[in-house]
Image (cartoon, helix red, strand yellow):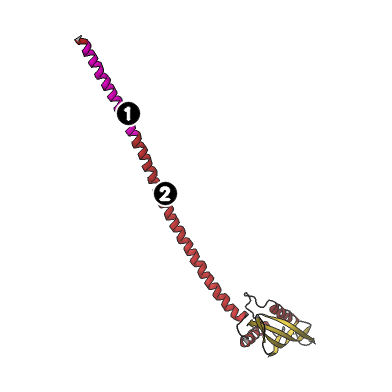
Amino acid sequence: MADLIYKLEERRQKLHIQTYAILCLLLVIFLSFYGYTKWQQYELTKQGLEQNKIFIASLRGQVSNEKTEADDKKNQGVQLNKEVGQKLKVIFPTTDDYTNLTKQMDIYEGQLSTKTNPFEVSNIDYQNPIQGDTYSVLPMRMNIRSSNDNFTKFLRMVESSGSLKDNVRLMDISSIRLNFENNEQSGVNASSIINFSVQINAYFQK
């Protein structure tokens, strides 16, 4: 009887030990899994923070570059407006500004005229300005002696006037009268010289 009780008690102790060992093993497995999961979360969070730092640094660099580009474009815009404003003072002035217009014609005459290819402005007659609804007109009459080639260049100059590129006062021709002069003994390249009287409208802001 005593041996039976002893064996039962021994078996119960072994069962308790096995149960305890299983519980300890399960606890170790759980703690290991829990720790591994948390470690993975930590690593992912760490990687995420590093990526965020890199992304934020990239954004800051991009913002800095865009700000620099925006400032450059702003400065370019300011400079362009300034240049356009200066050109408009010549091309489409706020007054009749016949003094500068006369200077322009003198410069143009000097650029074109040569001994064998003349362009000579003999007279410029400014008339009273005409006030319009949105702009004003300064009529002027010019008497010019020119070769055929320079006559064509003059017409092209008037035709392209008002361009920001050429910086020539905005104007057009309202009428023109031509007289051809025979120049067989003059040494001029063209076969004739054109004496012409031209009526021009030079425009300015109202």
**Is 75 inside the magenta-drawn segment?**
no
> Total of numbered circles in the picture?
2
Name above or below for residue 97 compared with residue 3.
below
What residue span does the magenta drawing correspond to?
Answer: 4-32
Q: Quadrant of the C terminus?
A: bottom right
| Tag 1 residue | 26
**What's the amino acid at mark 2?**
Gln
Q: State the predominant SS element of the stretch in magenta.
A: helix
Image point (31%, 27%), residue name = 25
**Is 28 inside the magenta-drawn segment?**
yes
Q: Nearer the viewer, residue 53 or 130?
A: 130
Image point (50%, 65%), residue name = 70
Q: Which mark is residue 51?
A: 2
Image point (39%, 48%), residue name = 49
Q: Secondary structure at mark 1?
A: helix
Q: Earlier in the sequence, mark 1 or mark 2?
A: 1
Image point (42%, 54%), residue name = 56
Classed neighbour count for the residue bearing mark 1: other residues with Cα under 10 Å, few (<14), some (14–19), many (≥20): few
Q: Quadrant of residue 163?
A: bottom right
Q: Quadrant of residue 80?
A: bottom right
